[in-house]
Amino acid sequence: MESIFRYRNPDTAGASGGPLQGVNIAIQPNVSVEGWPTDAGSKALVNFTALEDATIIRRLREAGTAVCGSTRMSEFGFGLDGSRAGEALKENAADVEMVLDLMGESRLAASRASVCGFKPSYGLVSSLGLIGLIPSMECWGLLSADIDRIRRVLDTISGPDPLDFSLPDEPAPDFSARGIKPENTSIGVISEAVSGLSSDSKNAFQASVDELKQAGFSVRELSLPDMALFSLVHNIVGSVEASSCAGRYDSVRYGRRAPGARNWNEMYLLSRGAAFGTLVKSYLFQGAYFQFERYAAYEDACRIRARLVADMRKLFDKADFLIFPAAVGGRFGQAASLAATYEQFAATLFANVTGQPALYLPPAPGSKAAGFQLAGPRRSDARVLALGEYLLNLRQEGNV
Amino acid sequence: MEFEAVIGLEIHVELNCATKLFCDCPNRPGDEPNLNTCPTCLWYPGAVPRLSRDALEKASLLCLGLGAELQPVSAFDQKVYYYPDLPKGFQLSQAHCPLSRGGGIDIMDETGKPKRLRIHHIHMEEDVARLVHEMEGRLPISLVDFNRAGAPLVEIVTEPDFRSPHDAMEFLKALRTQVRYVGSSECSMENGTMRVDANISIRPRGTDQMNTKVEVKNMNSIRHVGDAIAFEIGRQSAAVKAGEAVVLHTRLWDPDKKATFMMRAKFEGPCVPDPKVPVIELTAEYIEAMRSRLPEMPAARAERFIAQHGLTGEEAVFLSSDPEVAVYFEALIAEGVAPRTAMHWLTTQLIPAIRERGQKPGDTPVTPARFAGLLKMMSKDEINANAAREVMAHLFESDESPEAIVAARGFAQVSDSAELDSLIDKVLEDQPDAVAKVRAGQNKALGFLMGQVMQASGGKANPKIVRELLAKKLGTN
């Protein structure tokens, strides 16, 4: 069977004495590491080797981690088709995996591997060296069985980067552990996020909600009437951004130039036609359609996105955290079309639209509950992780 | 039917920043090809743009210098097109929210009446790579030089207020002067630091309809802009009279054939906001700080020269059109040179001499102090104008003071009457015909005799005293 690794690092030694010494991290080939093949899973980047290290790679090495290699990924990390994310953890080949999260990939990969998966707040981690597809939605997610490891890695890689001006002008967040007290912590359930579930999934989700109640949290039912628009907004804005930003993947300087072109226009058409896979190609086509034929619809989607962000923020006046199911519909391995892909990620992509942090927690072994997501307002990453850790500890103590 | 033209200009100005717009690579497009490149300006995957503060400031100064209103919020967009000069498939440009809106330039129209030509907006954008087309044996090849990729540009987009080639040329001359004043660019069309596209349409005179425009590019001097507009007005008028439709397209000006030629159908799609370049928010303090850095602008300076130094309007405009010349002029006055002497010697002697040597008023070895020394010796009658011109030439060659040059090379004026007396007597003796003519009242001959005396003195005689002595000897006064 094909290796889960796209590239294995022959020299895994990090700086000695660092706070993350002994932590073994697997990345994806969309993180720039000087000299490593960084094709982001696409033929459009065949033969491309990064010229400089991503800021996060420099920080990880300085902290003493061993970056053991990059795992096979879907094209540009879009969807999980062809991705082996999560398998390095299952095989004990890594302690933490870094997986690009454009619409929920890191959280669903965690669900597939029965580990925790965390998508941080947008703008928390430097994007220098990120080879992606949807700049305003994507960021690196972290997978591990151990939430404390996720927290320590995030503490290492987050914070202002003088080389990435796109980070908001905010101080580095404080990741020191904070106690969670269930008696004064409320968790909201958005009824519209649950209404689309099958009755089996509904029951499993209800079991997760019951776990929170048993732990002493107050659970509140909340409403976000336009919940269904998240998918539409992500689809339109994401595809337009992808189509415009993927213009650089023209197979001229790297990638494979298609033979037989009579002029450079034909060279672009033939090379780009041969470079992209079906799913990404249809996404780029859709984006170009909205940009050039339906620009007003794109502008509407941007406005609706701003409203959704505001609506979501208001929910945190009523609850400290939100709980979401991890999957609504769709199954792995069947997401060859855009519609099927969006169905598969319908429960997770809200956090990419809003930029808020979201943590996937696997179900307790043997429980009839399903895995679920916990979300907080933007930059509440430390608290979301603390809540997840609190629940895992309760399970270990056998209290739920 | 009589037609009038409706013309708007799009002017790209390359800012003279030390670095490119989004990275720290040197902004020196003329270096050895592809020397000044990095992952950001090659637009490699994973690279992020970092907006240069210097470029933002130079662009802000340029906007303020043209009377434009800096916008509190502006942002970069992705302008999508596929061409080998743009390897990332989009150009970063401010399509939706430009850096400034409004502004304009006052010119005189053909009839001498003042006319305001308005600016619609000014935005920042990055330059693209330079393509070089060559033959490798019999195979045509295209080479790409990324030194220019990512260079900082501003684009000045005017309102369609222009009606003639004259309007366009006057606007461009004034624009160039004002941008040089604020120090943001050299604005040389010849060197490509100012590039002009003209959008031209025609309509029946007296109507206010807006017809399909044609864009003309590739003019590399202000004169060519005028020529291309004049040609295009003629071409479109003839086409409309012949019943042909004008379609939206781009034409290239061919300076040899003096005509425009069809280049391509124009394609423009809407631009998508760039998710990685932060939105630019200018605070009131920033805008005020920029405003306080603005120098005195040419129109204000010319008015002051008229009021303060008694220059004519034409003289004042000439001296204030180049900031280095204006500064030089005022330095001479500060050294104690009379304004009219300074103006006259600067415009007729020193500036041509400086240009001839490929220097600039700001960096010539003939500093205002040295040149003022020379002019003051002349006004004290220590040397005459002929000698002053020669001493000026020596000032370029050596770093001696003008006084030392005069002393060492014997340029001192001869004002000694006894010495001049004998010179004049000798000339009068040698030129009896001229003497006879002067006595018969022909003043031209007096000038001839003056010239002979000056020549005999080796150019050093004081012409005032020579004239007096000659008059006395010939009894002409």
Image (spheres, grey):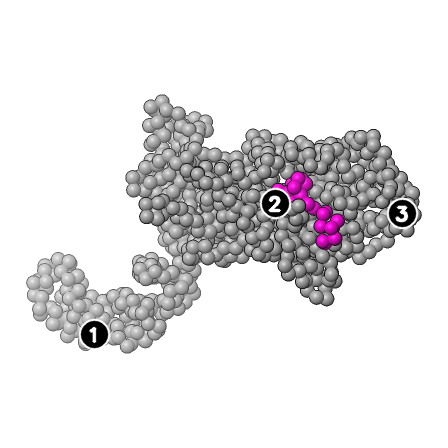
Horizontal and vertical percent for residue A152?
Answer: 76, 56
Q: Name the residue under label 3.
A: A182
Chain name for mark 1: B
Residue named by callout 2: A41
Q: Which of B318 and A226 is in front in this view?
A: A226
Label 2: few (<14), some (14–19) or many (≥20) C-alpha neighbours in 10 Å: many
Q: Give the range drawn in magenta.
A: A73-94
Placement of B201 over or under B169, stated as above or below? above
Query: How far is disc 2 from disc 3 in space, using C-alphas?
Result: 43 Å
The mark lying in front, picked from 3 and 1, is 3
Residue nearest the observer in this picture, B473 or B333: B333
Three-letter residue code for mark 1: Ser
Q: Mark 3 lies on which chain?
A: A
Q: Where is residue A194 in the image (x, y as percent from the top left)?
A: 80, 33
Secondary structure predominantly adopted by residues drawn in magenta: loop
**Amino acid type shown at disc 3:** Pro
Number of other residues with Cα within 10 Å of mark 3, as a class: few under 14, some 14 to 19, many 20 or more: some
Q: Can you tell which quarter of the image residue B386 is in?
A: bottom left
